[in-house]
Amino acid sequence: MTGTVATETTTSPSARLRETFTRLSRHGLFWPVVALVVLLLACGIVSPGFLDVTVRDGHLFGQVVDILRQSATPLLLAIGMCLVIATGGIDLSVGAVMAISLAVSLTYIAESGSGTTVATALTGLALGLVVALAIGLFNGFLVTVLGIQPFIATLILMIAGRGIAMLITKGQITTVTSPPFKAIGAGYLFGIPMPVIIAGGVFTLVALLVRGTALGMLLESIGINREASRLAGVKSRNITWFVYALCGLLAGLAGIVYGAPTMAADANNVGLMKELDAIMVVVLGGTKLEGGKFSLAGCVVGALILSTLERAVVIFHLPTQVTPLFKALILIVVCIAGSDRLRARAGLVRRARRTPAAPVEVAA
Amino acid sequence: MSTTSTTATEPVVRMTGITIEFPGVKALDGVDLTLRPGEVHALMGENGAGKSTLIKALTGVYRIDAGEITVADVGRRFDGPADAQDAGVSTVYQEVNLAPNLSVAENIMLGHEVRLGPFVNWPATRRAARTHLARLGLDLDPMSMLGSHSIAIQQLCAIARAMVVDAKVLILDEPTSSLDKAEVAQLFDVMRQLRADGVAILFVSHFLDQIYEITDRLTVLRNGRLVGEYLTAELPRLELVSKMVGRASEDLADIEKAARRTTTHDLEGRQPVLQALGLGRDGTVEPFDLELYEGEIVGVAGLLGSGRTEVARLLYGADRADHGTLTVRGAAVRSATPLGSLQRGVALASEDRKKEGIIGDLTVRENIALAMQAERGAWRKVPAKELDATVARYIEALSIHPANPDALIRNLSGGNQQKVLLARWLATAPKLLLLDEPTRGIDVGAKAEIQRLVAELASEGMSVVFISSELEEVLRLSHRVVVMRDRQKVGELTNGPDVTATTVLETIAASGSAS
């Protein structure tokens, strides 16, 4: 975040304000945050009490808390996707991976016969994650070792993944009763919904991982100029492989968090189109699809916009079928507002308009 | 050379007061250029003098900010390359941009096919192609694939194509940089033919010999300004060079002498830093032997495509070697990789700054940190304090401008980008630094600074391989010169008073059997 404020003593307060605004608006997250705030306020106006948060039964309660909970899945997906996109790649398989990991976890719990114990639930969780990690490693293998284009390489599992999930669930919707497992998606810790804790924890860990080490910089350098990075000794293969594996693992976790409350593994519908949501969240957060510079904080804002939008459609009494249209609208608005080219043009216009007035400012 | 007296003829191209500005830079400042029919005119200047900008103004690629262009006495305002072509200005670029998988005839006649209603009359088109080839004295099968011919022949086809539109002016931008001697002779024959036909030819080449062999007149540019127009035959070489570099010829001789003094050096008692024995890679470099010693600058000279870049890439491990052995500081290297080389103290600054050097969207600090960080691996981040100190040190030592570590490298000038990249490699504390064209495309001041730095580093014990297409530069700096030709090492000269650009060029030109 930009914490710096203009401290020119000679400029007038209004000029200073304008400068602060200009500087803030240059920040990659400025327009996404504006979009989020506008959405929240609009909902608050249409539905009074929307922004209220109360404590009920020791848990935080309210629409905003719900939005946070809803944001967990897209955020988990987007964090992995963001790192993959930074390397100049893409992972289309994350939606299918959600279905697979959930299918593996629930099938294990269903067949263990002791679904109610914590140990079984945790083993189920671990198995789901291991399978998701394996899939991520496989994607990474295709991309880095075999040199297949990321789009094609991950398209394979995007298509085949649901079939694999169907095989695991034997074509049925596997349902189990396991309170400990359900808690992963529906429980609370210190009054905060579990998915929010998980997503927040993962975000913190990954942020520390990429920014606390040199991983983030090397990822960006690979995404911006792979050959130059290779010649500078960057192990681009290992690093790229690592982020695909991480992306798979996080997609698996997202699948479990998403499916745990219902405890039903519907191989056909879990995670459907979620890969596109994840990409949208990444783009909303100001990370460019061509790779290079990335923003994990942007993923948080993007995920919040996405789930606020989904909620807003309900608040505004619109048919939920039109949600995709609103997603597209928001995406267009944020992308246009953040467009460098547009800004350059607007800047030219403003400068042209301000030029005659400039001497006055100097005099003041 | 029978310099036909063409002074009396009316110029076909008159460019006066041409000025072109890029953001923050005046690339051309009031430059004049006059081309006369039946004349080969050389455009001379060091890298960054504005040659290519002037050519692009004449071919309509750049719009001029001030000045006038007249072609055949008609004032022109070029809004694109098509306008220039319509005015009778044709260009053949260094890289042949034709379609290698089409036939020679198709390439020459593309866009000018003989029509038969809505169809192409192929027999007539082929005949026309043959006529155009014959005009240049070329006996080629018009039906053969263009790609099956040598680059030289392809270039001649490009010229034939340029002449299909009856060009009054032909621009040849470094056409000889990848040709061998016989091919150059063939090209010159074609140029003489065209000259006799009254075409005005603008010729750009780095090779002084060629300038004196083929051109009648020359225009010298320096730092975007016109130095003057001269008759080639009346301008001695040293004078020409001093006009290009902007120093009096006596000064130049002084620099030569000073440089020579430092080159007396003996390898007695020194340790070899690197030994290559029969190192080679199929299709890029024939096996070669090379030994590099501490504190030694070894120049690599050769034409473009002679394999000089490939030698550096093999030594660094950017490409995998198919043959031979490599020993670095006494230890055999089984298969060199960039990372391994960095860890052994070998660094390569690639010639392609943009594609293989800078990470455009990252800051100066991050660009300097990259190799150092890669050496340690992703998990062991270079501590901020250590990095800041390193970055500050190199920004100062190399006078990188702007001196702001947070500036994005893509916003820096070419010379400063090059300095940042040098800082990247120097920060890894290499024992051997491979520099591939470190001074290409950067301004004269930065060039001198980099040359001085190289000499300094060597005096501190670093071993440096210095690759440059500017022979003078190689000779000024190097203790030894490795000469490359046709992807082979054809010789190795110990630098001394008797070694001149001519000696090196002779070694390049001599047949491979002589070594």
Image (spheres, coloured by chain):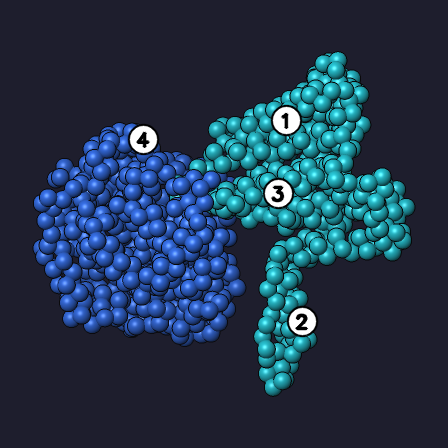
Chain colours: A cyan, B blue
Indicate the chain on which mark 4 is placed: B
**Location of mark 4 (residue):** B335
**Location of mark 2 (residue):** A17
- Quadrant of the rendered image containing residue A165: top right
For disc 1, the neighbor class at 10 Å (few under 14, some 14 to 19, many from 20) is: many
Considering the image in quadrants, where does the N terminus of chain A appear?
bottom right
Considering the image in quadrants, where does the C terminus of chain A appear?
bottom right
Q: Residue A44 appears at what percent x and percent y? A: 85, 54
Give the residue type at disc 2: Leu
Indicate the chain on which mark 1 is placed: A
**Location of mark 3 (residue):** A204
**Location of mark 1 (residue):** A129
- Of badges 4 and 2, the one in the foreground is 2
On the same chain: label 3 and label 2? Answer: yes
**Mark 3 and mark 2: Cα distance apart in space:** 33 Å
B30 sits to left or right of B217: right
Q: Residue B437 appears at what percent x and percent y? A: 31, 52
Disc 3 to disc 1: CB gap under 8 Å:
no
Of labels 1 and 2, earlier in sequence is 2
Q: Quick one: A90 or B392, which is closer to the camera?
A: B392
